[in-house]
Image (tube, grey):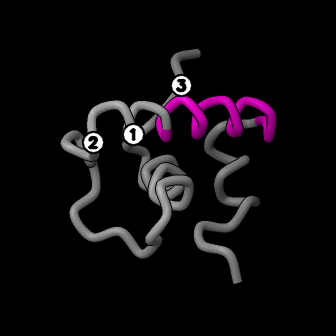
Amino acid sequence: MIYPSIDRLTEKIGSKFLLVNIVATRVREMKEYNHYQMEVKDYKSKKDIGKALEEVATDMITIKK
C-alpha cells in the first residue's frame, strides 16, 4: 500500500496535477539545500518524493487559496 494514500492527498490539495507540481518543487528544494530544511523528523519513506508527499499529508506544505 502506498503511504500516504492518493485520496488523502487530493482531499488536501484538490488536484492531482497541482499535487505533482508541489511535490516536484519540494523535491528540488530538498536536493538543492542538501536536506537541511527537512520538515518532518521521522519519515516513513526513504526517497525524497515520498518524504515530500508525507509533508503534504501532515499539512506542512499547503497551498494558498
Q: Is residue 42 above or below residue 8?
A: below
Residue 44 in the image: state x and y as whole percent: 42, 75
Question: Which secondary structure is most common in the magenta stretch?
Answer: helix
Q: Which residue is depicted at the point 35% across and 68% down?
A: 43
Q: Is residue 65 above or below residue 51?
A: above
- Amino acid of disc 1: Lys
- Residue 63: which numbered mark, if any? 3
For the residue pair 47 and 12, the one nearer the viewer reads as 47
Q: Is residue 23 above or below residue 64?
A: below
Do tag 1 and tag 3 residues touch (Cβ < 8 Å)?
no
Looking at the rendered structure, the kind of residue marked 2 is: Asn
Furthest toward the bottom, the residue is: 1
Q: CA distance from mark 3 to mark 2?
A: 24 Å
Q: Quadrant of residue 33?
A: top left
Q: Magenta span covers which residues?
A: 15-27
- Dots 1 and 2: beta carbons under 8 Å? yes
Please identify the quadrant where the C terminus is shown: top right
Secondary structure at badge 1 equals helix
Query: Residue tagged by mark 2?
Result: 34
Q: Pick whichever, 34 or 10, lies toward us.
A: 34
How far apart marks 1 and 2 lie (CA) works out to: 5 Å
